């Protein structure tokens, strides 16, 4: 990696927990992700192979990617985007998603990517928090043979949040859409104007300059904007990918996540490019048109490393072995998983049927906040299915009790990180108190992950799951508070509680309980209406599995909903300590 100016200090902990890394250093992550390679043999190497769901495909060499990123960076500049601005990107899985992110970073602006599966209110509140003047979106994207009409959702969100002055629209699906004169511009039109010149200097940034914010769910309230910076994030994502997946020049790396989540930010966009590998990206659903789609693409493109989530593995496993068995998966040499604990059946299937007992599985534990892999095997580590094994180099984790004391081997406790690391979040955007409260108040000098775990006699970590009001649905992170606020935004609902219950494919599914407003009758139709309402506000992933109408919700005397109790009752488990329950 290259720096424009070397740092004076690696770690500045004088204002803990607001740690700073590589203080005084000057760089730009795009310099290392693209510019640096243009001086080497990688200039004409493929940076990205992209396949659309309908079967179309596009490829970009490092040279071509640089051209597109530079052109779009010039477009953004001509719209007045500069250091300190945050551009919101709301796109399907398209090359333009990567191009837009890199273009922001190149000129020193920050990006806030909103997952394309989110909907109106989720998008609106992120635009509002970031005060974005520029939004990049598309007319639509393909999923399961259907068009997801992103621009319609964006229009509704912009109506709720009028901060957006310019909306740039990538043409993907081609159906007629509403374009507002003076606000909406086609990406392709802008890219053909003289303002989109092919040369753009990469702006030197301080190591600690903001690279992006990414909103994620926490225990309470609205999603929080997790901040990552150029220097530390660059070093950490590069290093973790290099060592954990042993990436080499000849690899074809496929991280099957969405760039809209941290997994995609770190391991589709930044780390693979910094490492100079060829990334593969696929727009659509794994089962479209048939459940062999992924296996066919692995064969066709000679994918060497596949990194995905347990929920995707379970989803494909249920179609049986014959789909993968039709294909030659011999190019694979390593597999990976992330997002939730992997159950033994899914691990076994992944290992034997997909990896043909030849490919070790890197079960990587990490979070939006950690920037990159934290607990993970290396290809040489002896594996235990279901355990992310041991911490990465330089990462110090432990499992502790309420008094910050390590729990005995084999016992469950809070998973904490004991020392800072370069890829850590720097703060919560515009909310330093929330950063302290959420991550540092409980264990003071140790970072609170929000997960529970246990360690075995070999020091292997077994992550159990979230201890807070965060639900992992198909590996996606959602907060009960967001689902509840979507529910109560419906005129018929006065109160709501959401919990996660185990689900065979999704890992967890959301179940909601609602109290209706006086005079409203609850029936099947209403439940369906409310589910659709949550889908419209938040996105399809947040739709509750069931909605039950109730007269009361269990609450503490201070008025907090006791979700733990709802969950215990739903699962038929003992109710535990109910001394705080109101009469
Ligand atoms: O509960 C852990 C689970 O995912 C949470 C972080 O979610 P998010 O910020 O969306 O990032 C997901 C992708 C990095 C964690 O608190 N989790 C993630 N990876 C694993 C995991 N649980 C068990 N095993 C994993 N490998």
Image (cartoon, rainbow, N blue to C red):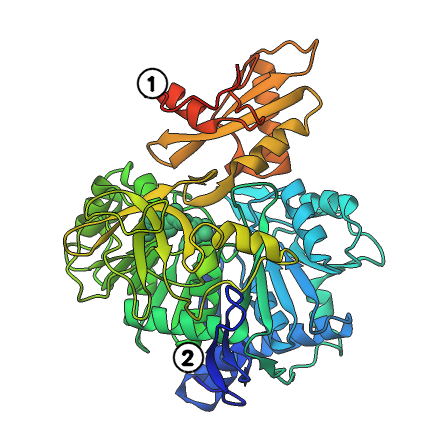
Residue 45, labelled with which disc? 2
Label 1 CB-ligand 1 distance < 8 A? no
Residue 88: horizontal and vertical position, in percent?
66, 58
Mark 1, other Cα within 10 Å: few <14 / some 14–19 / many ≥20: few
Report the side of 101 relative to 318 (left or right): right
Q: Quadrant of residue 494?
A: top right
C-beta proximity under 8 Å, tags 2 and 1:
no
Q: Which residue is mark 1?
A: 572
The one of 570 and 80 positioned closer to us in this rendering: 570
Q: Nearer the viewer, mark 2 or mark 1?
A: 1
Residue 145: horizontal and vertical position, in percent?
50, 42
Would residue 272 be visible to someone looking at this image? no
Q: Please tell me which residue is depicted at 56% across the width and 41% down the height of the picture.
A: 220
Q: In the figure, 532 relative to 39: above or below?
A: above
Q: Please tell me which residue is depicted at 23% across the width and 52% down the height of the picture.
A: 354
Label 2 and label 1: CA atoms lie apart by 57 Å
Report the side of 505 relative to 73 (left or right): left
Q: In the figure, 405 relative to 104: above or below?
A: above
Would residue 153 be visible to someone looking at this image? yes
Q: Quadrant of residue 91?
A: bottom right
Lower sequence index among marks 2 and 1: 2
Report the side of 536 relative to 309 (left or right): right
């Amino acid at each position: 990696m290259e720096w424009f100016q070397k740092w004076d200090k690696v770690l500045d902990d004088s204002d803990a927990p607001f740690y700073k890394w590589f203080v005084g250093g000057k760089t730009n992550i795009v310099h290392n992700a693209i510019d640096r390679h243009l001086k080497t043999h990688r200039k004409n190497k493929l940076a990205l192979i992209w396949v659309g769901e309908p079967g179309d495909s596009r490829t970009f060499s490092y040279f071509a990617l640089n051209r597109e990123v530079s052109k779009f960076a010039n477009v953004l500049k001509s719209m007045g985007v500069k250091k300190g601005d945050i551009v919101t990107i709301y796109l399907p899985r398209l090359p333009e998603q990567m191009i837009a992110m890199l273009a922001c970073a190149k000129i020193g602006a920050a990006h806030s990517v909103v997952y394309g599966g989110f909907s109106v209110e989720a998008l609106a509140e992120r635009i509002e928090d970031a005060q974005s003047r520029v939004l990049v979106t598309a007319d639509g994207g393909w999923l399961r043979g259907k068009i997801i009409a992103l621009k319609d959702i964006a229009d509704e969100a912009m109506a709720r949040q009028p901060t957006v002055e310019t909306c740039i629209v990538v043409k993907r699906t081609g159906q007629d859409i509403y374009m507002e004169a003076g606000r909406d511009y086609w990406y392709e039109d802008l890219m053909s104007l003289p303002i989109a010149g092919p040369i753009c200097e990469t702006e030197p940034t301080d190591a600690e300059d903001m690279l992006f914010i990414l909103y994620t769910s926490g225990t309470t309230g609205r999603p929080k904007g997790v901040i990552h910076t150029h220097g530390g994030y660059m070093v950490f994502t590069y290093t973790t990918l290099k060592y954990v997946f042993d990436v080499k020049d000849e690899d074809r790396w496929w991280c099957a996540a969405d760039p809209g989540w941290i997994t995609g930010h770190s391991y589709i966009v930044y780390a693979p490019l910094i490492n100079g590998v060829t990334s593969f990206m696929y727009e659509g659903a794994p089962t479209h048109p048939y459940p062999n789609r992924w296996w066919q693409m692995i064969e066709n493109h000679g994918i060497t490393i596949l990194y995905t989530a347990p929920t995707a593995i379970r989803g494909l496993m249920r179609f049986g072995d014959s789909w993968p068995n039709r294909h030659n998966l011999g190019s694979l040499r390593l597999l990976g998983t992330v997002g939730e604990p992997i159950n033994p059946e899914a691990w076994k299937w992944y290992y034997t049927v997909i990896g043909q007992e030849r490919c070790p599985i890197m079960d990587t534990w990490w979070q939006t906040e950690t920037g990159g892999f934290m607990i993970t095997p290396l290809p040489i580590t002896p594996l235990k299915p279901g355990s992310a094994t041991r911490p990465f180099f330089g990462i110090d984790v432990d499992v502790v009790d309420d008094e910050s004391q390590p729990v005995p081997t084999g016992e469950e406790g809070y998973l904490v990180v004991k020392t800072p690391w370069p890829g850590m979040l720097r703060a919560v955007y515009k909310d330093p108190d929330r950063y302290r409260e959420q991550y540092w108040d409980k264990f003071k000098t140790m970072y609170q992950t929000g997960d529970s775990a246990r360690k075995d006699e070999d020091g292997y970590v077994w992550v159990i799951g979230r201890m807070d009001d965060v639900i992992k649905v198909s590996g996606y992170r959602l907060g009960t508070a967001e689902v509840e606020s979507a529910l109560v935004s419906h005129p018929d609902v006065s109160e709501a509680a959401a919990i996660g219950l185990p689900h065979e494919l999704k890992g967890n599914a959301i179940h909601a309980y609602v109290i209706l407003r006086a005079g409203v009758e609850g029936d099947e139709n209403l439940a369906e209406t409310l589910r659709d309402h949550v889908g419209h506000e938040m996105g399809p992933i947040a739709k509750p599995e069931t909605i039950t109408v109730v007269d009361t919700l269990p609450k503490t005397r201070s008025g907090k909903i006791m979700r733990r109790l709802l969950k215990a009752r739903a699962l038929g488990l003992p109710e535990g300590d109910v001394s705080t329950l109101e009469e």
